Amino acid sequence: MMQRLTLAVAIAALALGSTAGCSRSGGPEGPTPEQIEAERLAAEEARLAAERAEAERLAAERAAAERRAAEAERAETAAAREILEERIHFDYDRSEIRSEAEQQLMRKLAVLRANPEVRLRIEGHCDERGSIEYNLALGQRRAEAAVNWLRGYGISADRLETVSWGEDRPLVRASNEDAWAMNRRNEFRIIAGGDRLRNPAGS
């Protein structure tokens, strides 16, 4: 009887000790609410930083693309302006359009067609030989020859105007064949629509 009682007490003590041991040593404790909140805030800050970096990258790409487009537009306008303002030259005492001048006028024609808002003033010039009155009339014929050529290809007359300077505005101030050849010319001035120009030859 006594042996059984002693055995029962021993078993009960062993069970109690085992339960207490489990309670003390348990599994690892989970993160605290403060740790969970700190981790959430860190993850949110990382996400926002990544979004800001991506937005900055996209903005930089857009700005670079806009700069490239603006530079290309300026270059295109400059090239078209150069074509429109290119001089043509004439033979001595003549107002007929020469073959090389026709090629120049063809390039001008393409730009004028691509830019219907453009208007030109065509200025006729002569060398110093001949009277003032004769050279004024010859300069006018030269300017009108270019106008008539362009009108023949469909450019409206209200986009073109003329003036003759005769011998008054020489390009080269000298009295020799080379200077005279340079001074027998038409100048082309853009008087409207020249801010932005399309250049069909460069597209």
Image (cartoon, rainbow, N blue to C red):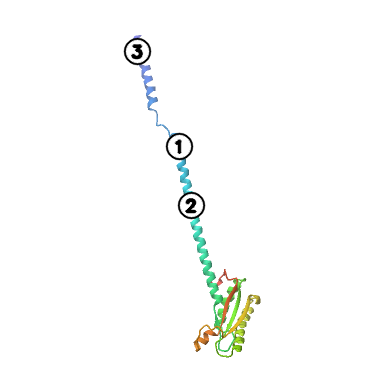
Reply above or below: 26 against 123: above
* Residue type of the residue flagged with mark 3: Thr
Q: Nearer the viewer, residue 188 or 152?
A: 188
Mark 3 element type: helix
The single residue placed furthest to the bottom in the displayed view is: 130
- Mark with earlier residue (3, 1): 3
Q: Position of residue 110 (x, y in %)?
A: 58, 74
Q: Residues within 10 Å of mark 2 (few under 14, many from 20)?
A: few
Q: Residue at x 40, y 25 (%)?
A: 23
Can you tell which of label 3 and label 1 is closer to the viewer? 1
**What is the number of callouts on the image?**
3
* Residue type of the residue flagged with mark 2: Glu
User: Quarter-wise, where is residue 168 in the image?
Assistant: bottom right
The quarter in which the N terminus is drawn is: top left
Q: Position of residue 155 (x, y in %)?
A: 63, 76
Q: Residue at x 50, y 63 (%)?
A: 68
- Mark with earlier residue (3, 2): 3
Q: Residues within 10 Å of mark 1 (few under 14, many from 20)?
A: few
Q: Position of residue 50 (x, y in %)?
A: 47, 49
Q: Which residue in the structure is indicated by mark 2?
A: 54
* Residue type of the residue flagged with mark 1: Ile
Mark 1 element type: helix
Asked whether the beta carbons under mark 3 and mark 1 sit within 8 Å of each other, the answer is no
Q: Residues within 10 Å of mark 3 (few under 14, many from 20)?
A: few
Q: Which residue in the structure is indicated by mark 3?
A: 6
- Mark with earlier residue (2, 1): 1
- Using the numbered discs, state the Cα–Cα distance from disc 3 to disc 2 in whole angstroms: 76 Å
Q: Which residue in the structure is indicated by mark 1?
A: 36
Q: Position of residue 27 (x, y in %)?
A: 40, 30
Q: Residue at x 48, y 43 (%)?
A: 44
